[in-house]
Amino acid sequence: MANILLLANINCDRILRLDKPLQTGGRFHYQDGGLRLGGGGANTGLGLVWAQHNVSLVSQVGTDEIGDWIVAQASTQGLDCRMVQRFNGNTCEMLLVMTPDGERTIIRPQRPIFTLAKQPNWANWDAFYINTSALGADTWALAAMAQSKTLVVAQLAKDERPRPCHVLIASITDMQGRCGQDLWAFAQSISGDHLQYFIVTDGENGAKVYQQSGYQHVPAISADVIDTTGAGDNYAAGVIHGLCSGASITDAMTEGARWAAFAVATPSSVPGDKLKNYLAG
């Protein structure tokens, strides 16, 4: 059991299920799939809770009823939300537009600037995960790596902002048009000298982990795809769980692939009962 701090968004997702793939200028019918808890904080955090880790969330929601609903839902499901900050204003729904082939388009509101408050005592945390654009995330990460044995894992940002960490994770889509150099050199330019591993996922083609000495390939785990939402978040959760349990990086990536396979085979962004039953067994 590890103490894990997640710096990630937490949302109220509204699901719109279309009758056919999206096309510019088209007209579509949809079924309203209702509201569900989502965002990287929930998608990554709940599986880690089911794996018996103590998981705390640093995020930001409004002071409205939707914000209250998000915090209540997350807390009820086992996430410690005492570090969730509240801003004065509305927490708009995140729209997830799902097509029959399981692909999704995300339409999200413009978020207010999220500035991190006082740092936690890093001696209390075994792992710190970053998947947000919050101001001060790089300062927190550097302090965690300098002051303690906290494992820092981060998702590559959509822009070129620094992501100091031990493990950097990106998808092959994230990398398109961004890297005209050696991948390890690119990752180090983002994450600095603390970087130990750079993982690049490629869906059904598996993932590669880069180090200065080269790379290794870890296969994907096949699944019947129902909903791809949250696959990357669940992959990261599986990797974090593996590393916190003492696994090698390739074994942790295999665990991440397994968690992602459970996620895409579930009509939800959180991994659902299949992962819960796997962890309980």
Image: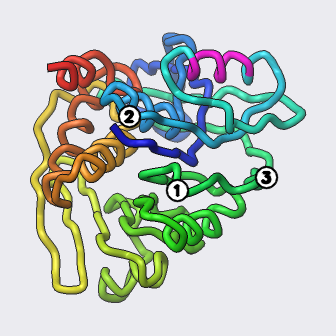
The CA span between labels 2 and 3 is: 30 Å
Instruction: Tell me if 157 is positioned left or right of 49 in this view.
Output: right
- Front-lying residue, 143 or 257: 143
Q: Is residue 69 magenta?
A: yes
Q: Identify which residue is drawn at 42% across, 74% down.
A: 177
Q: Is the N terminus in the top left, top right, bottom left or bottom right quadrant?
A: top left
Relative vertical location of residue 138 with respect to residue 78 in this rendering, above or below? below
Label whose residue precedes the other's in the sequence (1 or 3) = 3
Q: Which residues are magenta?
A: 68-75
Residue picked out by circle 3: 113
Which element type, helix, strand or loop, lies under badge 1? Answer: helix
- Front-lying residue, 29 or 196: 196
Instruction: Tell me if 241 is positioned left or right of 255 in this view.
Output: right
* Crowding near the residue tagged with mark 1, few <14, some 14–19, many ≥20 C-alpha atoms within 10 Å: few
Q: From the top left corner, tell me how far across and down residue 169 is, in percent.
A: 37, 61
The CA span between labels 1 and 3 is: 28 Å
Q: Identify which residue is drawn at 27% across, 24% down.
A: 226
- The residue sitting at the front extreme is 123
Which element type, helix, strand or loop, lies under badge 3? Answer: loop
Q: From the top left corner, tell me how far across and down residue 192 is, in percent.
A: 46, 81
* Crowding near the residue tagged with mark 2, few <14, some 14–19, many ≥20 C-alpha atoms within 10 Å: some
Q: Identify which residue is drawn at 42% across, 63% down.
A: 149
Q: Is residue 238 magenta?
A: no
Instruction: Tell me if 162 is positioned left or right of 88 in this view.
Output: left
- Front-lying residue, 92 or 211: 211
What is the magenta segment's predominant secondary structure?
Answer: helix
Residue picked out by circle 2: 53
Label whose residue precedes the other's in the sequence (2 or 3) = 2
Q: Amino acid at mark 3?
A: Ile
Relative vertical location of residue 22 with respect to residue 28 in this rendering, above or below? below
- Front-lying residue, 50 or 184: 50
